[in-house]
């Protein structure tokens, strides 16, 4: 199992905290996420794990590849719209990092050492 790049670890943490903030305020949860938000969090983690851009990615909202199913994409957008502005108060360092990631140019695919350029499926 490969190690996650620090950029991807931060992205996972940011998304998890945004979902937790949304769940706490909308579903009145305390420590654990409700079932719906837990499913969204797990789904987001799988999407991040399988992201073809990895540490070179921009934010998902600015990505040229939309890998979320439409229902889940709308749910994560709702979470981001709510939690994004509030992250500056709760987790300012992660919020600023997420903002900077959003300014990244459209990413290119992750370069793999020794992989031939012609192996694009």
Image: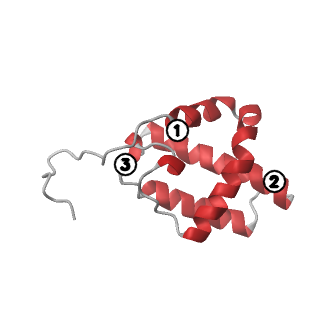
Q: Secondary structure at mark 3?
A: loop
In contact (CB < 8 Å): disc 2 and disc 1 = no
Q: CA distance from mark 3 to mark 1?
A: 14 Å
Q: Residue at x 39, y 42 (%)?
A: 106
Picture quadrant where residue 39 is located: bottom right
Write down the residue under mark 1.
Answer: 102
Q: Is residue 90 above or below residue 70?
A: above
Q: Position of residue 95 (x, y in %)?
A: 64, 35
Query: Up-down: is 56 above or below 48?
Result: above
Residue depicted at x 51% and y 45%: 59
Residue that mark 2 sits on:
24
Q: Closer to us: mark 3 or mark 1? A: 1
User: From mark 2 to mark 3, how far is it between C-alphas?
Assistant: 31 Å
Which element type, helix, strand or loop, lies under badge 2? helix
Can residue 29 be seen in the rendering of this structure? no
Q: Is residue 27 left or right of residue 18?
A: right
Cα distance, mark 2 to mark 1? 25 Å
- Numbered tag placed on residue 53 in the rendering: 3
């Amino acid at each position: 199992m490969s190690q996650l790049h620090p950029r991807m670890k931060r992205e996972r943490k940011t998304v998890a905290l945004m979902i937790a903030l949304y769940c706490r305020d909308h579903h009145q949860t305390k420590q654990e996420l409700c079932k719906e938000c837990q499913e969204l969090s797990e789904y987001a983690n799988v999407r991040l794990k399988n992201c073809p851009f990895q540490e070179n990615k921009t934010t998902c909202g600015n990505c040229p590849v939309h890998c979320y199913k439409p229902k889940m994409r709308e749910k994560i957008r709702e979470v981001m719209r709510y939690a994004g502005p509030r992250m500056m108060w709760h987790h300012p360092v992660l919020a600023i990092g997420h903002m900077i990631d959003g300014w990244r140019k459209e990413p290119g695919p992750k370069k793999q050492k020794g992989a031939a350029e012609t192996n694009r499926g």
